[in-house]
Amino acid sequence: MPSLSQIKEYFLKVIKFLLFVLLIPVVIAVTAVFYKHIAALDLLFRLPFAAGLVMYLILHLFICELEGLQTFGQTLLTNLFRFLGPFTEVVPLLLPVYSILFLLGLLLERHFVKSLTIEATLIFLSGMSLAMHAVLTAKALRAKDTGTLKPDYFFTFSLSFIATIGVVALLLWGVVPGFSFPHFVKGTFRAAQQIYLVVYRQLF
């Protein structure tokens, strides 16, 4: 007979899986609206950004995964936010440290240097590091969850993905002309609402 702690753990996993299912429309909405906003930007931004995303996927699949680099960045964040106590471990899941640094570098570059070559390089690296953060975070979370349905992995990565894209969108608002964080948030809410309504009508 299962112990009380095992029963509690089971119900917690069920709740996490149900929450993940409820988050699916938000994940889809965030992805679709972020893509739409990036696609609407100037070619000088969206081309190197997309190239960076694709480049990391190629590196990850065929050459190396850059896990050491990811671990180094997450360690920096952990040390920086040590004052948060038990919440410190959550920070590296939510903040794509290298994307943040490259986008802040892009902000400084546009104010003081204004070199198209440096700008394109920073945009490329911000896209590449965003892909690295998402892929390696997913890999690490999946490895930690030994359950059959992996409810911890799906739930935690969903929250991590939403927060990561939100942070990047907020930074883009301050760095890239034509990108609006308020419009991104409104678009995400509307898209998620539409998906929820479609699912509700199909079920009921």
Image (cartoon, rainbow, N blue to C red):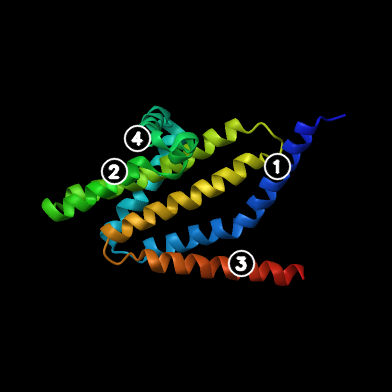
Residue at image location 83% in from the left, 30% down from the top: 2
Q: For residue 46, say whether it is visible.
A: no
Q: Earlier in the sequence, mark 1 or mark 3?
A: 1
* Nearest to viewer (mark 2 / mark 4): 4
Name the residue that disc number 2 marks.
101
The kind of residue tagged 3 is Ile
Residue 101: x %, y % from top left:
29, 43
The amino acid marked with disc number 4 is Leu
Q: CA distance from mark 2 to mark 4?
A: 14 Å
- Identify the residue under disc 4: 80
What is the spatial separation of the Cα atoms under label 2 and label 3, in whole angstroms?
34 Å
Disc 2 element: helix
Cα distance in 3D space between marks 3 and 4 = 38 Å
Q: Is residue 2 above or below residue 202?
A: above
Residue type at mark 2? Leu
Give the Cα separation between the discs numbered 4 and 1.
Answer: 31 Å
Q: Earlier in the sequence, mark 4 or mark 1?
A: 1
Spatial CA distance of label 1 from label 3 is 26 Å
Q: Crowding near pointer 2: few (<14 within 10 Å), some, many (20+)?
A: some
